[in-house]
Image: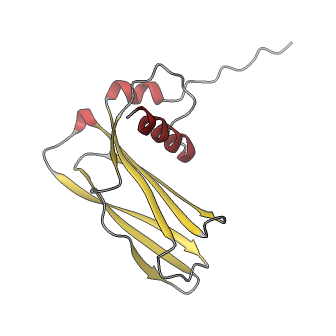
Amino acid sequence: MKKAVQIFVLVLLSVGILSAAGPDIDMPKLSPHQGTASTPELRRTLDETIVILNVNANNSPHVLCASSEFDRHRNVYVLHYVLTQNQDLFRRSRKRVTVEWRLRGYRGDGRNIEVRGAVVTFRTSQLQTLMPKPIRPMPMK
């Protein structure tokens, strides 16, 4: 479990949700991509391929961060997403959140697309520790 948490923190750092805020942050609950998302759907336009994925989440407000990268060594597009929610605002219902990536120039059939993602829940106190701190200007000499 500790390794999964470390990987999760690296994902949050890579998509810009988490900054190097320090080791005193309580770790959030994590739901991995498996079982929470549908199979990606491909749609084509003239110059790009749109990859659409539906993710199941609690019917409360959310923040979605998505990114993509091309792994030249494995010849694979890696699509990342992190859906973040406040656990203190949960409701007794579910919703479907659509994640969309636009890949310019991609003409494949989807076999070389890999999706990595998570649905993450924080408590309000945990979210407050992630808020950016004001930067104090350095005194002029």
> By what rule are the colours in the image chosen?
secondary structure
Along the viewing direction, whichever of 40 and 130 lies nearer the viewer:
40
Please provide percent x and percent y for residue 92: 13, 45
In terms of image quadrants, where is residue 1? top left
Above or below, 14 against 1 in this view is below
Of the 4 image quadrants, the one containing the C terminus is top right
Q: Residue at x 19, y 53 (%)?
A: 94
In terms of image quadrants, where is residue 133? top right
Along the viewing direction, whichever of 24 and 48 lies nearer the viewer:
24
Along the viewing direction, whichever of 12 and 61 lies nearer the viewer:
12
Q: In this view, does 39 lie to the left or right of 4?
A: left
In terms of image quadrants, where is residue 129? top left
Q: Which residue is drawn at 55% across and 40% down?
A: 13
Residue farthest along the bottom direction in this orientation:
46
Please provide percent x and percent y for residue 59: 22, 50
Please provide percent x and percent y for residue 61: 30, 46
Q: Is residue 63 left or right of residue 102?
A: left
